[in-house]
Amino acid sequence: MGYSGEFDDETMARAYGKDLKMSPKHSVEICRTIRGMDANEALDLLDAVTEKKKHIAFRRYNKLVPHRKGGAAGRYPVKASKGIMKVIESAMANAQFKEMDPDEMRIKTAAASRGRVIEGWMPRAQGRATPWNEETTNIEIILEMTED
């Protein structure tokens, strides 16, 4: 499993979160929102989402999702926001290790894909059981230097 975006070692930094216990749908919507933003701007947005001050617009499968202030149908995916924040901070730390300024970087690639399914069971009456699986998500972040 590799990165999906092109990578130049001298001007970019990257991080990968594998099998994170969060919703793949929420992660895809968050990645779509933060793609192209400055790294600090994206962290501020995700921090506001965890405090439920700003929402993430849901563009697909949003039939029963209510519209929020600002016009778009959306939710506050707190758990996924916290996980993606950690991956962005990791990419910024990788940039700092490579002696780049993480404050002057933007998100070039933000991708989320389904990870493995952790199988589980929930006991039911009469000796039966119901599947109770846990979804995981793989998150990929590539930061690049901005040309000012």
Image (cartoon, rainbow, N blue to C red):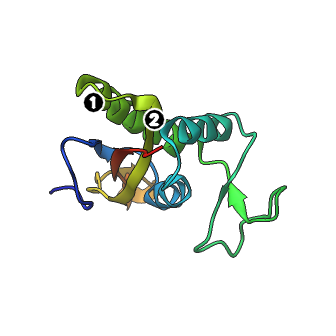
Outermost residue to the front? 148
At 18% from the left and 43% from the top, the residue drawn is 9
> Image quarter for residue 129?
bottom left
Q: Position of residue 71 (x, y in %)?
A: 81, 64
Quickly name the residue at label 2: 104
Quickly name the residue at label 1: 94
Q: Does dot 2 land on a helix, a strand or a loop?
A: helix
Looking at the image, tell me whether mark 1 or mark 2 is earlier in sequence order.
1
Q: Position of residue 95 (x, y in %)?
A: 30, 31
Can residue 128 be seen here? The reply is: no
Q: On screen, 48 above or below 115?
A: above
At 45% from the left and 35% from the top, the residue drawn is 104
**Camera-nearest label, 1 or 2:** 2
Outermost residue to the right? 69
Amino acid type for the residue under numbered disc 2: Glu
Amino acid type for the residue under numbered disc 1: Asn
Q: Mark 1 near mark 2, Cβ–Cβ under 8 Å? A: no
Marks 1/2: CA–CA distance: 14 Å
